[in-house]
Amino acid sequence: MSYAVPMTRREAVLRQLREEIVSGMLPAGTVIKDAEVAARLGVSITPIREAIAQLAAEGLIDIAPNRTRHVTRVTQKNALELIDVMQVLACAGFAWGVHNLTDSHLGRMRLRLDEFVGNLEQGNVTAAGAAGADFSTIAIMASGNRELQTHVDLVVARTLRLLALTADSDVWQVWIDGYRETLALLEADDRAGAVTRYRQIYRDYRDRVETLLFDESDGC
């Protein structure tokens, strides 16, 4: 019997702050003050500072020269740059892992896809984004390249945040259709076709984000 290892305070704080930023609960530009966050979450300053350092590495928090920390703003330019980077990393991992996928992997991907769609129907974009990310992660991890997954993890939170910011548009349908068709091709053992369809998701998503209005002066 296996047991889940309890999270450390740093891990718990990191998860909480990341979710608050990704979901928009902490809007872009919000100043993050160690003492205020520590009091709100009922922890000491140390895990707060450790979590902020990690979130800064992930690009979710900006640290100004005067050490002021605030939630990173999203402009159309950096949104498109993020999509370009995520496309290179995720599509490489998917292509490398696709031929190692077993029926067990495909079953897990089907489960994550169902969770993805179900959470969207319930309006839970945070959980939907996490399930969607897991759909891709299963294939990327099948590549056996853990270094690649580490780099994907560094940008996935910002990608999920971007999806949450565009939740009121039809961009989610790009992912629903893309995931469904990709999985159908995998289940039909058309691995090359699945890779091509998976890559198309990112191209379609980028095209949709280009049509969205971002405030280039203030960010989102």
Image: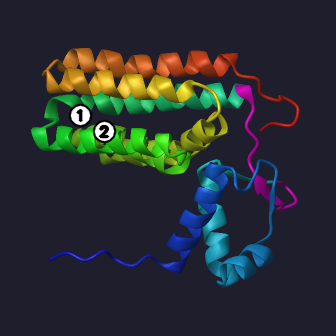
> Tag 2's secondary structure?
helix
Frontmost residue, 116 versus 158: 116
Q: Looking at the image, which residue is at 79% across and 55% down? A: 70
Frontmost residue, 161 versus 156: 161
Picture quarter containing residue 101? top left
Q: Which residues are magenta?
A: 64-76
Magenta stretch, overall SS: loop
Q: Looking at the image, which residue is at 57% across and 20% down? A: 206
Whether pointer 1 and pointer 2 mark residues with C-beta atoms closer than 8 Å, the reply is yes
Q: Looking at the image, which residue is at 58% across and 15% down? A: 207
Q: Looking at the image, which residue is at 66% across and 84% down? A: 42
Give the crowd class for mark 1: few <14, some 14-19, many >=20 residues within 10 Å. Answer: many
* Image quadrant in which the N terminus is located: bottom left
- What's under tag 2, amino acid-wise? Ile
Q: Is residue 85 left or right of residue 200?
A: right
Picture quarter containing residue 67? bottom right
Q: Is residue 119 found inside the magenta-colored segment of the image?
A: no
Picture quarter containing residue 51? bottom right
Residue 140: mark: 2
Could you tell me how many numbered marks the image carries? 2
Q: Residue furthest front?
A: 122
- Visible in this render: residue 77? yes
Residue 97: mark: 1
Residue 203 x %, y %: 49, 16
Q: Is residue 134 left or right of residue 87?
A: left
In the picture shown, does residue 54 fall above or below 114?
below
Residue 166: mark: none
- What's under tag 1, amino acid-wise? Gly
Q: Is residue 15 left or right of residue 109?
A: right
Residue 215 x %, y %: 83, 30
Q: Earlier in the sequence, mark 1 or mark 2?
A: 1
